[in-house]
Amino acid sequence: MAINEVTKKQVTSIDLRKAVSIIDLNDSKQASTSQRRKRGSDEGLPIRERSFLLEFEGGDGITFSSDKDEDKVLWYVVVPSRCLIQ
């Protein structure tokens, strides 16, 4: 759920279970594949350390980054087990 920081009201709700792929933006092979896709509003922003992209049908995606390597690994364990990722 995304919340407006000023009004504290819900702006949108995103069902992460509908993700179709998870792309490691720090892996040069996976990152080069994702960079060919339209990145939208975050295009041109530097890729942060420990970042990854959850991609949805239609090419929409959300970029996340983790504070620790262990946290990023958890995303790669939990997300595929609960999503449409094949």
Image (cartoon, grey):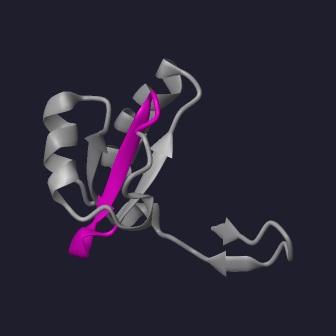
Residue 39, image x, y percentages: 31, 61
Would you say residue 86 is visible in this rendering?
Answer: no
Q: Is residue 22 magenta?
A: no
Residue toward you, 9 or 15: 9
Looking at the image, the residue that sits furthest to the top is 69
Q: Can you say which quadrant of the picture contains the N terminus?
A: bottom right
Question: Horizontally, is 16 left or right of 37 in the view?
Answer: right
Q: Residue 42's x, y, as percent? A: 43, 58
Between 16 and 50, the residue placed more toward the observer is 50
Q: How many marks?
A: 0
Left or right: where 2 falls relative to 43: right
- Residue at 86 percent across and 77 percent down: it is 7
Is 50 situated left or right of 31 in this image?
right
The residue sitting at 32% across, 69% down in the picture is 60
* Residue with the most extreme front position: 44
Image position of 36 (left or right of 3): left
Measuring from the top left, give residue 21's x and y in whole percent: 24, 53
User: Considering only vertical position in the picture, is 23 above or below 28?
Assistant: below
Could you say where residue 64 lies in the image, as x and y percent from the top left? 48, 46
* Nearer-the-camera pick, 11 or 71: 11
User: Where on the picture, by quarter, is residue 62?
Assistant: bottom left
- Is residue 45 visible to us here? yes
Instruction: Provide the residue span drawn in magenta.
Output: 47-60
Q: Quadrant of residue 73?
A: top left
Is 54 part of what is drawn in magenta? yes
